[in-house]
Amino acid sequence: MIGNAPFIVVGVLFLMGTVAILSERNLVKISIGVSVIASAINLFLVAMGYRNGGAIPIHYLAGAHAKVVLPIPQCLTLTAIVIALATTALMLALIMMLYKHYGTLDVNEIRRLRG
Amino acid sequence: MLGKIYTGFGFWDVSAWIAFFFIASFYALWLRSMGRRDYKKGTDQDEIYWSGNPVPEDGADITVPASSAYWGYKKAFTPFYNALVAFHSGITTDYAGWFVFVSAVICALAVIF
Amino acid sequence: MNWSQHLPALVVAFPLLGAFATPLFSLGGKFLRNLLFVAVSLVTLIIAFLLWRNVLLHGTILYVMGGESISLTLPSGFAFPVRIMFEIDALSAFMGLTVAIASFAGALFSLQYMNGFSGLHRFVSLYFLLTVGALGMSLTGDMFNFFVFIEIASVASFGLIAFWRDKPEAIEASFKYMLLSQISAMLILIAVGSIYGKYNFLNMAAIADAIQMTTVDKLILALLVSALAMKCGAFPMSMWMPDSYAESPSGVTCLLVTVSQVSLYGLIRVCFTLFGTVAQNSFIPWIFIVLGMMSMFFGVTMAVIQHEIKRLIGYHSISQVGYMLLAFGVGLSALHDPRALADYGFTALKGGLFHMVNYSMYKGLLFLAAGALYYATGTRDLDRMGGLARRMPYTTVLFLIAAAAISGIPPFNGFVSKLLIYESVFTVHPVLSAVALVTSVLTLASFVKIFQTAFLGPEKNQWKSVREAPAGMVLGMMVFGFVIVGFTLFPSWTISNLIEPAAKALVDQAGYIGAVLHP
């Protein structure tokens, strides 16, 4: 049961992010929701990569273990973190420019493109 | 290069259509050449007829704008279009909501079937 | 060492080099930057063409990044596929060629179109990054790498859509696309992580070999399908599409159209190759068909009432994607029934693939022609245009070719692909063909409307001094026009050389797996 705890946290975080995106009206809070989802998925990747009883894949530090774990999920997580950082920065920049143009951060007011 | 493409129930042959195009353009040009050339230039004969009224100088006065095109069609489908335009509300979170909704439906179908 | 064996890496590395060399070249002035812009896209096009030809001649090409073979082999003889690799079969090469053509035409067009705006070195860099993302998505053989390229393409397109940052609408469109595409990227990442957790592979061929039909696999497939269907613009998730297509600069829009096609390529790659055994006989073909029908119908009905030229054409993108989703849905439903596949499934796939490349070409041309009108008149509102055919003859002829092709008027290429789709999908149910035909009629109606209000009619005094678009822009449009006329005049050559190998690669799951695991 305790082994599944990370996945429960992932699920809760993911739902929190989704609810924030769908129900919040402030653009900054929506972007926080996106970041929360990104963190949830990074946690998911790391938790998924855990192998019980596995050793690190460095030969002289691994000791006498039979199992060696590939470091791929950690690579995935690092890449995903970098991508999330870039997109969050870009999203905040766009939000700043939206505030400049529209004078509001309310998502219901920023709707010139419709119909 | 110009061969036929079979669709299983019929075929498509572009060379037949090119032949048709030449025959049709030949016919159209022939029809055009039958027209009279002896009209008087610069008189009423080469003026546009606009219900007997003088034709406005600016073309903008006699064009139908794009918004008015297919007026009857739009009028007939007003309830449909009201709903559809309201659906494209312009609110970003609505769009995200539809996306999450469709993903949820597809995931639910995946679990059921 | 044969240089042609490095083509797969070059086709991605070359525009990437271009992207990061642009700021450097921009120091040398405008001419040097423009030269780099066109030269790099032209060389990319040539490399993509050579790659496509090599694939046709020698079959599937594998390119492993930083290693001789895809597997990590331990001294004990244990082999494990971990390395990032490109696997290029006829379908990937076909998509790569389409992207390279669109990128080249858009680059030629943008030279003059963007002339006079500041920050162009950033524009060129982002443009090349978008090309890299799209090319990488179509060539990669690794799921996580696919995610990385999809993110490169997305981030570049956010920047490009918002390039005219003085316009509030451009920023708004970019933000909308960004939010949706971030959610879809997260869904793809969950799916990729789950695949790794279950099978310990990220290599597409290895996954396809190991895939089973459990609930988890179906959930992964469902996540991938919904995320990629959003990226290619299926109906209830397509509202970002007209917004971002209308607000981005036209040279970019023609590339964005192709990027949405590459997302569709990802979708069919996942469903046919990766999950071929799971997707068979399940609900997935019907998801395709239902989404396709809705996209076709609602997309085109929204397009008919628009009066802003790029928004109208943007709504048509939704309806055209519907045709392909319908064709691929029918093809997928017939995938594991050899008789049905031979009867109608393969024709539907050929029609869908042919429509993909046709759509990229004529929709790119339509957006470029709309951009030329905007350049000449300074407005996108059809109500204010009129009588422009006298002043802009080249644009008119090219627009007419593209409009005839998208409306499916014979003998244009759009008709051939639509014919292949109509005549195959009706075997599943006649209603599918009926909806497709109604959509085609409404498409024609809305393009008659554009042509009549923008090009025909009496000349308005306001536009007496309008001049034809500059030569560079006409040249960019002519690239697309040339391809469309080529496909029109030589349909059987196109089908047998370009489409049929791609369709065969799409249904040949064993070949895709075997090229990697049993070379």
Image (spheres, coloured by chain):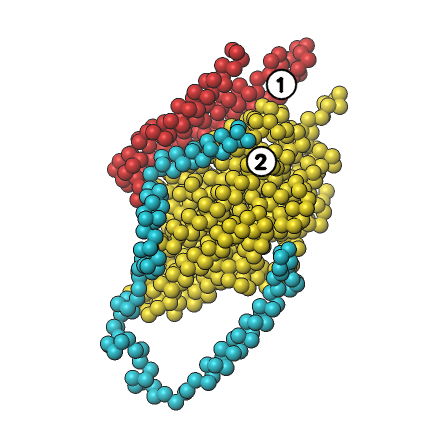
Chain colours: A red, B cyan, C yellow
* Residue at horizontal 37 percent and vertical 30 percent from the top: A21
Circle 1 packing at 10 Å, graded few (<14), some (14-19), many (20+), is some
Question: Could you tell me which chain the residue with mark 1 belongs to?
Answer: A
Q: Is residue A53 left or right of residue C160?
A: right
The front one of C13 and C416 is C416
Quadrant in the rendering for residue C162: top left
Secondary element at tag 2: loop
Quadrant in the rendering for residue C175: top left
Expressed as whole percent of the image width and height from the top left, the position of residue A3 reads 53, 13
Secondary element at tag 1: loop
Outermost bottom residue: B38
Image quarter (top left, top right, bottom left or bottom right) of the C terminus of chain C: top right
Q: Which is in the foreground here, disc 2 or disc 1? A: 2
Question: Could you tell me which chain the residue with mark 2 belongs to?
Answer: C
Expressed as whole percent of the image width and height from the top left, the position of residue C331 reads 60, 45
Expressed as whole percent of the image width and height from the top left, the position of residue C384 reads 30, 60
Please determine whether, in this image, residue C2 is positioned above or below residue A4: below
Quadrant in the rendering for residue C372: bottom left
Pointer 2 residue: C282
The front one of B10 and C479 is B10
Pointer 1 residue: A69
Circle on res. C93: none
* Residue at horizontal 38 percent and vertical 50 percent from the top: C302
How far is the residue under mark 2 from the one under mark 1?
Answer: 35 Å
Please determine whether, in this image, residue C301 is positioned above or below residue A87: below
| Residue type, numbered disc 2 | Ser
Circle 2 packing at 10 Å, graded few (<14), some (14-19), many (20+), is some
